Image: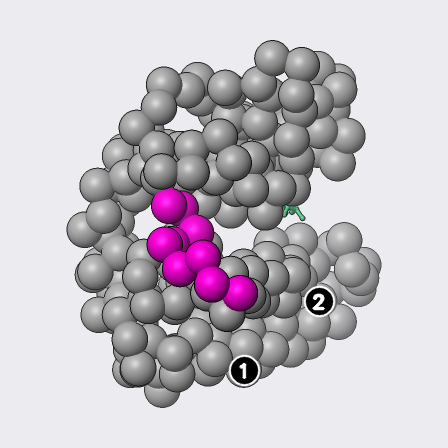
Amino acid sequence: MKLYVIPGTCAVVPHTALEWTGADYELELLDHDSVKSEEYLRINPQGAVPSIVDGETVVTQNIATQVYIDANYPDANIFGTDESPDGQAQIMHWLAFLNADLHKAFAPLFGPDGFIEDESAQEKLKAKAQENITHLLRLPNEQLGKQDYLTGTKTTADIYLYVTLTWAKKFDIDLSAYKNFDAFIKRIEEDEGLTAVIEQQGLEKIGSL
Ligand SMILES: N[C@@H](CCC(=O)N[C@@H](CS)C(=O)NCC(=O)O)C(=O)O
């Protein structure tokens, strides 16, 4: 199995999941140019990471890559161990929130010119995006006030939340009102799989917000 990533992106999530499986896999590090190359567009026509190529199988979209890893390595429990309907709904709830709502909310910060050309309008857009992200992050902060991990036990949803917190730090989003994230960051950065990924992708642990 080969995983394509750009360091520091949402591809940290399936990458950590693969580390948790203990399986052999190949890693290809891309950058913002090579992700748009003709060669890579044949794998992922959206020019985005993550992608998995496994023999004839090509899997794109972050959640789909996680589902593929989970289906191949069920013993790694990347979605946790609660197989009850409620347990499965909870993990999917958080992954959907993280991928479809929170991740998306960062798009105007990463590429404001993709939304609007006028530079002063871009500043307003970025301010609005920061407000939106702050509002969304109240939900995981509340959840982490009740338990150490989003669903109770450590899953890929926690890694996804961690990635978005590294982005929030990068964009200087003021999250000082949220008291549960610093302890969460310390806890998750102790994970061996995530630590290996941080090293392989040439990243640094953030320690706190
Ligand atoms: N909906 C897609 C979104 C993937 C996505 O936004 N990937 C970003 C990184 S987080 C990307 O590859 N952007 C291209 C770039 O940074 O040049 C998914 O869930 O996989």
Say which mark, if any, is on residue 75.
Answer: none
Considering depth in this image, is 19 or 202 the residue closer to the camera? 19
Q: Is residue 62 above or below residue 142?
A: above
Instruction: Give me the residue at 75% from left, 71% from top.
Output: 121
x%, y% of residue 112?
69, 59
Q: Which residue is mark 1?
A: 135
Nearest to N terminus: mark 1 or mark 2: 2
Q: Which residue is mark 2?
A: 122
Instruction: Give me the residue at 42% from left, 38% from top.
Output: 74
Q: Regarding mark 2 in the picture, which secondary structure is present there?
A: helix
Residue type beneath disc 2: Gln
Instruction: Assess whether mark 2 and mark 1 are in contact (beta carbons under 8 angstroms).
Output: no
Q: What type of secondary structure mainly makes up the magenta span?
A: loop
Considering depth in this image, is 22 or 114 the residue closer to the camera? 22
Based on the picture, tell me whether residue 92 belongs to the magenta stretch. no
How is colour applied across the structure in the image? one colour
Magenta region: which residues?
Answer: 77-85
Based on the picture, tell me whether residue 78 belongs to the magenta stretch. yes
User: Does residue 94 show up?
Assistant: no
Nearer the observer: mark 1 or 2; the answer is 1
Considering depth in this image, is 86 or 98 the residue closer to the camera? 86
Quarter of the image holding residue 26? top left
Task: Tally the marks.
Answer: 2
Instruction: Give me the residue at 54% from left, 77% from top.
Output: 136
